[in-house]
Amino acid sequence: MGQPSDHGNHQLQPQWAQHPNLQPEVIRTFSAVWPREWPSQDQHFASNNNPMLVPDSGPSPSGSVVTGPGPTQPMIPMSQVPVAPQWDRSSHIAKVSTRASRRRLQAKSGVDLERGDKKATRTFSFVPLNSGDVILACCEEMKYAIFKISLLPTTTEIATMARSSWEVAVNRQSAELRNWAHNFRSSQQNNLGNVVDSIRSDMKDVARLFVYFRYDLQTYQMSVPHLMSRGTRVEYLTADHSRFLDVTVTINGQTVTILFGNPAVMAYLGYLLYDSRYQYHRYIDGDYTGPSPGGHGVSALNVNKLRPLFTMTGTLFRWALEERRTGTVVDSELWVKNNREYHQTLVERFDGMTPQQKAALQTLVDQIATRPLN
């Protein structure tokens, strides 16, 4: 291990000690205590085993002699030797992690671990694993109510249906789910109003297709004469709703008009009830047990239970026809306030049917589930 040398000793002295006007005594005094050079890394670790630094010449307290060039200096304790501070990164990371963990625990428990006092606590709500079953049950009950009352209900009717559907569905659940559902009663009932919009959205998309093909509005030539011809037909159909809703048949030599019995309407209902992914027949009570006039057995659906579906179908068909009044298609929204008056007209028309007219319509309803749609 190399010995300190006096080369560059003046560079280690502060500037005030190198000034030429200072008294030589002061310089000699400072040089006696100022190290000639900072210890290297090897010297720093080697000095940990020795309590004192050994001067360049002269006997050491232990009797060992270290020889080397340079003037004799007094022994300097290790405590007086300046050592560059060492930054312990691992210790710093541990302290930061500890503080972060303490803050997280304090936020959850509300207790200051350092002071021991309580602060404002956070409340946590636990959602049961099968909470989705409650929401699904409420939506299903809402669909039963919609197909029973109206597919174009008022705001008051929607609120009433949502409240009753929620109560019926929740009361069938376990105690744990009932307690959880009661905490979110208001928000869940408000969300049930979206079920009405969802059903109408599905129905109107299907209605556009049935109107386009069943009323012979399709054209493969977008020329002006063809578009004008289609516009003329739409005007004829919408001039009287009996032209696109009713059907005239001959039974036993007698001509009979069946309200809401148009083949396009019946095909549309058959598709929504049985032949689509919606399967709406599940939400309509089939309590009609009398024999079918057509001899096709017992009907699963009573025509009176289809009242909301018949009246909404007429409203959607008129709206879909109006989109092609000019010959070309003009996309439009189904605004409830713009169609409520016409929908109410159809409701009154359905309620004004005679028993004979309803019996004739029941015959067509029976045929929906007993023969393929064409």
Image (spheres, rainbow, N blue to C red):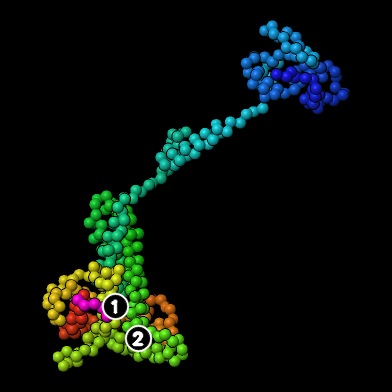
On the question of residue 19 being in view, the answer is yes
Circle 1 SS class: helix
| Residue at image coords 82%, 19% | 27
Q: In the rendering, which numbered label is found on residue 343?
A: none
Distance from Cα at disc 1 to Cα at disc 2: 15 Å
Considering depth in this image, is 24 or 369 the residue closer to the camera?
Answer: 369
Residue of label 2: 216
The kind of residue tagged 2 is: Asp
Residue extending farthest to the left is 291
| Residue occupying the point 69% across, 6% down | 63
- x, y percent for residue 8: 80, 24
Question: Badge 1, how many Cα within 10 Å: few under 14, some, many 20+?
Answer: many
Q: Which residues are magenta?
A: 370-374
Q: Position of residue 354 (x, y in %)?
A: 18, 84
Q: Nearer the viewer, mark 1 or mark 2?
A: 2
Q: Amino acid at mark 1?
A: Tyr
Marking on residue 268: 1
Question: Furthest-right residue in view?
Answer: 21
Q: Nearer the viewer, residue 318 or 327?
A: 327
Is residue 29 in view?
no
Residue 25 magenta-drawn?
Answer: no
Magenta span: chief secondary structure: loop
**Residue ID at (73%, 12%):** 66
Q: Earlier in the sequence, mark 1 or mark 2?
A: 2
Q: Looking at the figure, which quarter contains the N terminus? A: top right
